[in-house]
Image (spheres, rainbow, N blue to C red):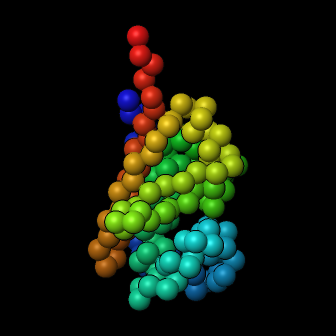
Amino acid sequence: MIQGVGIDAVEVRRIGALRRRRGRAFVDRVFTPGEQTYCLAQRRPDLHLAGRFALKEAAFKVLGLGFGTGLGFVEVEVTRGADGAPGVRLSGAAARRARQLGITRLHASLSHTDGLAVGVVVGERRVARR
């Protein structure tokens, strides 16, 4: 059963501006080492960072939490499956919140154009059988 759905859109230039203005501090605060390794090795790193940022924000919405509610961006990690499909891995407070909500699985989708990245996350919970 679906517990929640989150969607977020991020302008790629906004992420680029944050990276230029705040530098490494921004990247380290928002992205896990694995996300950084992948994104910063790409031809257009800001495009990939924006996609991950959008998916993180979408996951926060599924969890019913927003930025500034004690949840760190690095507690939501965007992963890549063997087929390249995005996934979401939770840790810390984000994982605890998912357990509180009964969320057992997250589904993620990511899309982008040259200027916009969009992330969608669906939280699924197990339904008790009768």
Q: Which residue occupies the foreground of this view, 10 or 38?
A: 38
- Is 112 positioned to the left or the right of 105 in the image? left
Q: Where is residue 112 shown, x and y percent of the image?
A: 32, 70
- Is 101 positioned to the left or the right of 126 in the image? right
User: Looking at the image, which residue is at 53% across and 41% down?
Assistant: 63
Residue 73 visible in the snapshot: yes
User: Looking at the image, which residue is at 52% across and 83% down?
Assistant: 40
| Number of numbered labels in the structure image | 0
Q: In the current view of this chain or complex, which residue is farthest to the front?
A: 82
Q: Where is residue 115 shown, x and y percent of the image?
A: 34, 76
Q: Where is residue 72 shown, x and y percent of the image?
A: 66, 56
**Quarter in which the N terminus is drawn:** top left
**Quarter in which the C terminus is drawn:** top left
User: Looking at the image, which residue is at 38% across and 33% down?
Assistant: 2
Q: In the current view of this chain or complex, which residue is farthest to the bottom?
A: 43
Q: Residue 99 falls in which quadrant of the image?
A: top right
